[in-house]
Image (cartoon, helix red, strand yellow):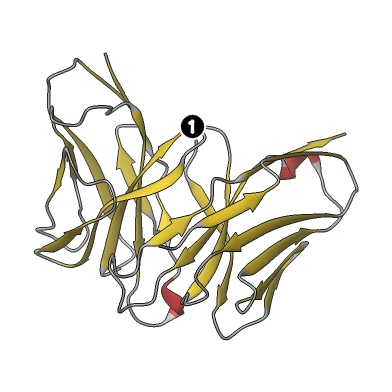
Amino acid sequence: KQEVTQIPAALSVPEGENLVLNCSFTDSAIYNLQWFRQDPGKGLTSLLLIQSSQREQTSGRLNASLDKSSGRSTLYIAASQPGDSATYLCAVRRPPYNQAGTALIFGKGTTLSVSS
Amino acid sequence: DGGITQSPKYLFRKEGQNVTLSCEQNLNHDAMYWYRQDPGQGLRLIYYSQIVNDFQKGDIAEGYSVSREKKESFPLTVTSAQKNPTAFYLCASSALAGAGYEQYFGPGTRLTVT
């Protein structure tokens, strides 16, 4: 059974610091991996999507990497800002031939707090 | 303005009552999903649908029901059989071809049952 773990559960950093959020998964047979941001009481905003054949994706100050063989992904945030404060969720998509089709399996998230 | 809408944002019900949560998308996506989020638990899949008039149970389907009569709509009914219905409910959709199956989420409905 696929399990997704995110470490740390919470992280506090001063503004301007570079940081890394970690995500690990137990079954390397994934179709893709998606990083989301969630603000309190809100829905999820997709940040980056990495296909299983890709090693990394970049969007602005965000860079996500994927190592399928070791079951790991990292989300790198450069020059953090107070507006980056939110919960970051990692999710993997099961291959189409598995049960639950195209649904995602989520980690519990890392809550980031950036102080000014 | 494309996206996913969920209504209402907040919903309050008495124990023993059924309640239906609305989810509509105008992204022309084939697949739609319902997830439940509890504090410290992460998101868990309730039901999903990959095509109109077809849907499948997810990991925690007991006490819930869905319908998919139209491509753009996937309502979720929380029945009185659901033992712990108070939670944050999120609807999502994705294309099944192209775009890498990226999932998009609605703003959520917070259900409180007393």
The quadrant the N terminus of chain B occupies is: bottom left
Left of A88 or right of it: where is A115?
Answer: right
Left of B111 or right of it: where is A76?
Answer: right
Q: Position of residue B11 (x, y in %)?
A: 29, 24
Observer-nearest of B56 and A69 = A69
Observer-nearest of B46 and B108 = B46
Q: Position of residue A98 (x, y in %)?
A: 31, 73
Amino acid of disc 1: Pro
A107 up-or-down from A111: above or below: below
Observer-nearest of A102 and A39 = A102
Q: Position of residue A55 (x, y in %)?
A: 67, 81
Q: Residue furthest bottom?
A: A53
Among the 4 quarters of the image, the one containing residue A102: bottom left
**Number of labelled discs?**
1
Left of A77 or right of it: where is B8?
Answer: left
B90 up-or-down from A75: above or below: above
SS type, badge 1:
loop
Q: Position of residue B15 (x, y in %)?
A: 18, 17
Q: What's the residue at 34%, 61% (across, down)?
A: B93
Among the 4 quarters of the image, the one containing residue B49: bottom left
Identify the residue under disc 1: B39
Q: Which subunit holds the residue at mark 1? A: B
The quadrant the C terminus of chain B occupies is: top left
Q: What's the residue at 71%, 45% (across, down)?
A: A8
Q: What's the residue at 11%, 52% (across, down)?
A: B67
